[in-house]
Image (tube, rainbow, N blue to C red):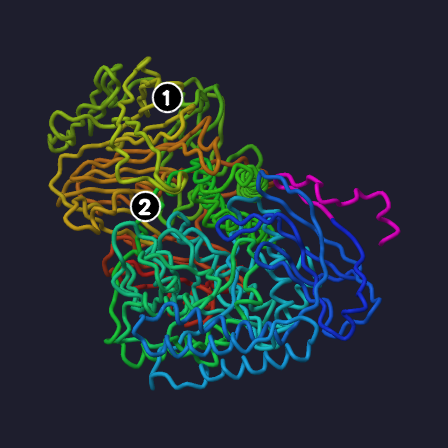
Amino acid sequence: MAEARHEWTPVVSDLVWGEPESYFWFAGTAVTPQQAAGKRLSMRVEAQFGRTMGRSDPQCLVRINGEIVQATDFNHREIMLSDDAIAGETFEILIEAGTIEDRRQMGFAVTLHIHDRHAEETYYDLRVPVDVARHLPEDDARRHLILNQVDKALAAIDLRPGDPARFTSSLDIARQCASVIYDTPDFEKKPTIVATGHTHIDVAWLWRLKETRQKMARSMATALRLMEEYPDYVFMYNQGVLLEWLAEDYPELFARIKGRVDEGRFEIEGALWLEPDANITSGESFVRHILHGVAYHEETFGVRPQMVWLPDTFGYSAALPQLMTLSGLDVFVTHKLSWNDTNRMPFETFHWQGIDGTRVPAYFLTTQPYDSRSIGTTYNPDLKPTHVMGTWRRHGQQALNDELFLVYGHGDGGGGPTREMLENIRRMERGIPGCPTVRHEKMRPFFERLLARMKAAPADYPTWVGELYLEYHRGTLTSVAKNKRNNRLAEIALRELETIAILASLHTGQTYPAEQLHRLWRIVLLNQFHDILPGSSIGGVYEDSDNDYAAFFGECERLTAALAATLADKGSHFVFNALGRPRSGMIALPGHEPLAIADGELRVDTQKIVRADGTIAQLAPLEDVPALGGRVITLEAGSGANGKGDLGLSARHIENAVIRADFDAAGRIVSILDKRNGREVLKPGEAANRLQAFRDMPVAFDAWDIDAGFEDQTFEIDQLVSAEVVETGPYRAAIRFEWTYESSRIVQVISLEAGAAQLEFDTFIDWHERNTLVKSAFPIAVRADEIRAEIQFGHVRRPTHANTSWDQARFECVMHRWLDISEPGFGVALLNDCKYGYDAKDTTLRLTLLRSPTYPWPQSDQGEHRFRYGLLVHHGTFEGEGVHAAAEKFNLPLRTFAGGAETAQQSLSLLAIEGREVVVESVKNAERGDGVIVRLWETRGQQTQIALTLPDGCDPVEEVDLLERQPRTLDAPDRKLDLAFKPFEIRTLKLGGIR
């Protein structure tokens, strides 16, 4: 290697290097000097390390004599070369240095040092007790005991040069003085803190995915190196995606990890594939995070993880307890609720009850510095006594728990635990008066003891009912809107693809594309990481995400079209219904030219429709499309549908037989009349679809936060450029509105279908403002003090008042596909196809449409936006098909695919549900073995009974858990399966014999 370096740039003290997202290699030869013979020899990397929020810049991976030995960074600068050095021994050193920040380095060097282990041990023997004493009251006798013994020890140390034996002897005396501290009995009963090594690594954030792969290698190399030096060191890691990347990039490191896992010192825990966002991620996606995470850890390490470890995610859905229980996961752990900006959570160890009534144990980490006066805690302390003492001090249930847990180690490229932390732990394990007892062990045994105590005395532990709402980072529900739209569309695309794949397999013998689906799901799961999906990463992360989604949608659409083509003959088209009930509705077909749908004697001409982005399509109604299946139609050239049906409109109003909407001169809706009962929908004198802009400059975290005072500067978007009728029927009427705001343009096509009670707002925005939040307001004339908002596998109720500090803090909340405000027998629901943030005050609902923060990505949300939302006037949230069904149809319209089969096909359906309360969430192939998985859930929050019509030859019919295990045979005579559901219950069936 040395011979190959003659053309490298020599490294001198004033060498300038380092660029953002760059890598540099340094190489050299170290020779053991004579004076180090027989001693411990270490090397130290000298660089201008920067440290930002625990991260380091640069971060280095060090190879010695061709082998990866360790990483170096701000927190880890030293590497042991030899315990018994040999004079003249050479070490070939190769260092890969990665720089992320936009800052330059000057110089780079490696220095050699004789490492005096005896002096180091004496130092920690004395320093760790001093760190305890400084946090004890001045009148505490233990404080004086510690300080007096340290004074004696320091007085005994002889630092005169020239006589190493004399120095060593004086260290022995000092350690004897220190031993008095460790041997002094403390209180008979002290709290115990269990400590486990860890490093939290964000999959992407202020760096791109490619850099995370390097961070993982560096962090694991350091952890493995420390395990060699410290036989008692245990380390926990949890994200399967990063372990898989490590196996691909650094198989030698991965092999060593597997060895440590087998040895029991490297703990694999945390059941999810990665640490996803828990607000926006759909319920089915969360199931797949569990499926992929558990399967990977079992298959790779032979380990069955049992915990949900989400320390850094921005709030937690009330659907999670049921998902955990149905997956055999027994405890939820975080610390993030300590970041609340208004209220402190009342307890840290408790039962968490979800929307369906399921309860799971939950634990909040309480680590913070002892002298902290905030409620904030951490999951990456540098583990000094202050953090151990602070963990106990911050714990609010001291009468209930005297054993607590903490993880320690620098995160996000800070390299994890250090030698100093391990030395600190060793001293605290020995026992220091005034400091809690410390036990260094794996995480899982602690939680098994906690779970046993909670099971033995459940009434001793309080219960928290509902979502764990983070009073912070509310802007992450909206930032980087394109990413959220891609996520929604990708989740829908996978649902459709899996269902069509089952249909094609069942009816035409096509091979189920398991490998392709596995790969496509991994793309979606990756981009649901809790700093990608929330919009809180740098621009490069979203370049990568855009590329991921482009590849995803291309492959997904090709595969879906190819499979769907087998379900209709050439020259025909297959109209696909992804829902678990038959439906009628509009189908949209691309193109400018009119078409006609032919089906036997039926012939229906299409109507041209206009979209907000200027594209043109054809629209026509279709009746009776089977559930989880479709029907075959023929498309021919048409003459264009004529007439207006029940539709009427002008540039200032639009109506059908059901509702009428009137607009003012600024394009806002000033009246919505429900003709069925003669009732006005809007508050008197107020306008709906009122577009408002707000100055949006959070105090702390730009992309993350919406501050409570965001309304201090409010600007109406009311500069209407034009309003013109663009569709007159007979199936749909529409008005196109265009506004300007500063340098931006907003276009909406507001449409109403014949016979519908639902207005649609198809929206195109060309946005060029910064630090601006945009909402659309709907003041509804109902008597209600709460709203319903859809979440994963259900919905929650939230107050619209600000009676308490908890209500006041909930000024921006999450929804999925619908938001509803109602009184008995009347109400309004807002539907959307890719939005997640809203606020509700009194009976005014506001959808959050976009925001444009400038940090950490200055170009966030600049450019074009496309999305739809709808307003549904109903006579009861769950009357008829209900709001949930309307939102499903809004997000999963009928789709049409060209046929390619040689023989004619007929209409087909996989199965159908009798009953409106229960829906099918997914249909897929079993993860293992044969069988079709069907996941259903109850949507209205009530007990109900349904009947399921199953495919021919279906045998056996089993109910399984979310991991598709623990089968229980169900009786289904004559292909009819009766199922009882509890409120919001999820049930998963495995159908055999039909493939």
Determine if residue 926 is in view: no
Determine if residue 266 is in view: yes
The crowd level at tag 1 (other Cα within 10 Å; few <14, some 14-19, many 20+) is many
Q: Which residues are magenta?
A: 1-25
Give yes or no for residue 287 being in the magenta stretch. Answer: no
Give yes or no for residue 6 being in the magenta stretch. Answer: yes
Disc with the residue nearer the chain's start (1 vs 2)? 1
Residue 515 placement, left or right of 962: right
Residue 737 placement, left or right of 194: left
Percent across and percent down for residue 311 are 42, 59
Residue contact at pointers 1 and 2, CB within 8 angstroms: no
Foreground residue, 408 or 886? 408
The crowd level at tag 2 (other Cα within 10 Å; few <14, some 14-19, many 20+) is many
Can you identify the residue that label 1 sits on? 747
Front tag of 1 and 2: 2
Can you identify the residue that label 2 sits on? 814
Task: State the CA–CA distance, disc 1 to disc 2.
Answer: 25 Å
- The amino acid beneath tag 2 is Val
